[in-house]
Image (spheres, helix red, strand yellow):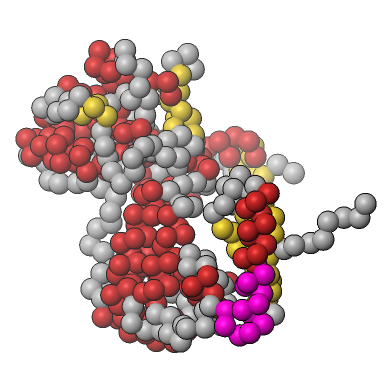
Amino acid sequence: MGDKPRTGVRAGSETTIQIDFRFRGERCRESIKLKPTAANLKRAELHRAAILDSIIKGTFDYSATFPNSQNRLKFTTERDFLSVATWLADWLKIQELSVKTSTFHDYKKIVNTLSVAFGTIELSELRRTDIRDWCNAQTCGNKRLANVQSVLRIALHDAMSDDLIDSNPLYGWTYERQEAPRPQDDIDPLDEHEQSMVIKSCRDPQHRNLFQFAFWTGLRTSELCALEWGDIDWINGLVRVWRARTQHAAQAEKPKTRRGERDVKLLAPAIDALESQKKYSFLADKEVFLDPLHGAPWVGDQAIRKTAWIPALKKSGLRYRNPYQTRHTYASMMLTAGENPVWVAGQMGHSDTSMIFRNYGRWIMVKDSDSGSRAVAMFSTSESNGQTLVNK
């Protein structure tokens, strides 16, 4: 018995059937939502035959036949104009299925901005000069402009991959304006006295535990929100960091980078904070830190900032910094004390020490009365005349 003839129809999954055909010289594969039973496969064959017939007659309408397919943007016979806004809306739907909730939320806000700026322009007519002129007119800083351009660059790359445009106007180029040096950088750690004032000014013991733990572990606010008691290794004195929660996500998510998953050493003040927190959440064996106002886990950094951090700063009389400064405080303390920058980078989840030296270089101990003495002891000998000769 010979093989069954190829029909161009096959089961795609337990709930879909895939149809293969050629259109305008290209092979196309589309899925229809039908369970691949014998009867449905036969129906799909008839559907494919009708498609082939309409292609031969020149009446095939891709958009009408497969309205949810990305190919409709490339093959539809009715599309003479594909706007940037239309493409970005379709692109965003695809991203929702593949990126983290927090990332999708950022993409959505940027797509809204881009749609206002370039939405009426035909996708294939968008030029680098359009993007440069828009950037020139903005009042935000280079960091924000870079974020917007990054999302647009990704979307345009995907459009080029789908043969909707011939080239990506943002490939290899990023708009950046000349900016005056900032009067001070974003890193503004709290000194020992200020830390003590914040802790003492907290209106709830759970707030004190949260901030003391933050000062002595360097965890991001989103990581603190997702921390569970099961992540604490009491025997080895470590905390396993592998989740983060933002206000945009319904549940905790993995860090954006592999290096973000790490073991952080529990120093004595951090252990003390955990011991004090036990009576509030330990028995539930879930999240470590709770919002005492609701008796539930913190939903994100904004809730911590508004209900715990700002009130503590106001009561203490300290000038405002955002809660992320607890992380910078940890880094500055470790480096000021002379801890190895490589170790500090690992504790904070950095892939190497470049960010440590770039952001916290001024806290690294560079002046030491014994500086150079170890090299002298290892590589030189003292002569009776008081001169130092290098060993040969």
Image quadrant in which the C terminus is located: top right
In the picture, measured across the screen, residue 117 lies left or right of residue 87, that is left
Return the x and y of residue 353 as percentages of the image width and height. 49, 47
Residue 4's image quarter?
Answer: bottom right
* Residue ID at (72%, 63%): 8
Return the x and y of residue 262 as percentages of the image width and height. 49, 34
In the current view of this chain or complex, which residue is farthest to the right? 1
* Residue ID at (58%, 40%): 375
In the picture, measured across the screen, residue 63 lies left or right of residue 119, that is right
Q: What is the number of callouts on the image?
A: 0
Residue 182's image quarter?
Answer: bottom left
Residue 240 position (above or below residue 301)? above
The reply to whether residue 358 is visible in this rendering is no
Q: In this rendered view, identify the residue nearer to me: 89 or 180.
A: 89
Residue 56 position (above or below residue 375)? below
* Residue ID at (46%, 59%): 94
Question: What range is drawn magenta here?
Answer: 49-60
Q: Is residue 57 magenta?
A: yes
Q: In this rendered view, identify the residue nearer to me: 232 or 211.
A: 232
Return the x and y of residue 51 as percentages of the image width and height. 62, 72
Residue 244's image quarter?
Answer: top left
* Residue ID at (63%, 72%): 50
In the picture, measured across the screen, residue 95 lies left or right of residue 322, that is right
Residue 295 position (above or below residue 41)? above
Q: Is residue 10 magenta?
A: no
Return the x and y of residue 317 as percentages of the image width and height. 7, 39
Magenta span dominant secondary structure: helix
Q: In this rendered view, identify the residue nearer to me: 352 or 305.
A: 305
